[in-house]
Image (tube, grey):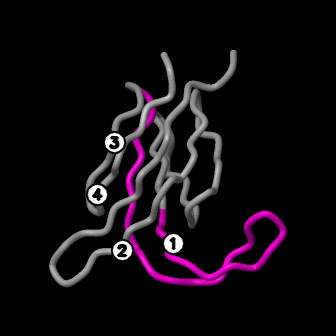
Amino acid sequence: MNAQQITIEETTTATLSAAVRVGCGNFWEETYQEGGKEQTGHTAGLWVMKQGAAASDHVRVHAGQVLQVPGYKLKVLEVTPGVGMAHGAVKIEVEPAAS
């Protein structure tokens, strides 16, 4: 399977496999480190729910960030906060982890 792009809308989850789902929420602008430089931009909370786990993992993410979840490498392409009644969204490139 090649890398694919998915968009996760706030308050929803994306199913990566029978054992892993990813959700997002809590969008705001903040300062973060990327490439050794301090930057300010949109961020979101990303929750990784693993089958059988007592709790989900939570991390703040920003565009350009790469993270590993069980079986996958995720690259955050865009973080778009909601405006008015519209929900925010996180666009992610999902690639199977190397075996």
Residue, x 41% and y 75% (percent of image)?
27
For the residues bearing labels 2 and 1, Cβ distance under 8 angstroms? no
Closer to the chain start, of discs 3 and 4, is 4
Distance of mark 3 from mark 4, alpha carbons? 9 Å
Q: Is residue 15 above or below residue 13?
A: above
Closer to the chain start, of discs 1 and 4, is 4
**Looking at this view, is 11 or 89 the one in front?**
89
Helix, strand or loop at disc 1?
A: strand
Q: Which residue is mark 2?
A: 81
Q: Is residue 52 above or below residue 64?
A: above
Helix, strand or loop at disc 3?
A: strand
Distance of mark 1 from mark 3, alpha carbons? 18 Å
What residue range appears in magenta?
19-45
In the image, what residue type sits under mark 3? Ala
Closer to the chain start, of discs 1 and 3, is 3
For the residues bearing labels 1 and 3, Cβ distance under 8 angstroms? no
For the residues bearing labels 2 and 3, Cβ distance under 8 angstroms? no
In the image, what residue type sits under mark 4? Glu
**Looking at this view, is 46 or 86 the one in front?**
86
Is the C terminus in the top left, top right, bottom left or bottom right quadrant? top right
Residue, x 84% and y 68% (percent of image)?
36
Q: Which residue is mark 4?
A: 9
Q: Which residue is mark 3?
A: 14
Residue 43 badge: 1
Distance of mark 1 from mark 4, alpha carbons? 14 Å
Q: Main secondary structure of the magenta part?
A: strand
> Residue 60 placed where, x, y %?
57, 67
Residue, x 34% and y 61% (percent of image)?
89
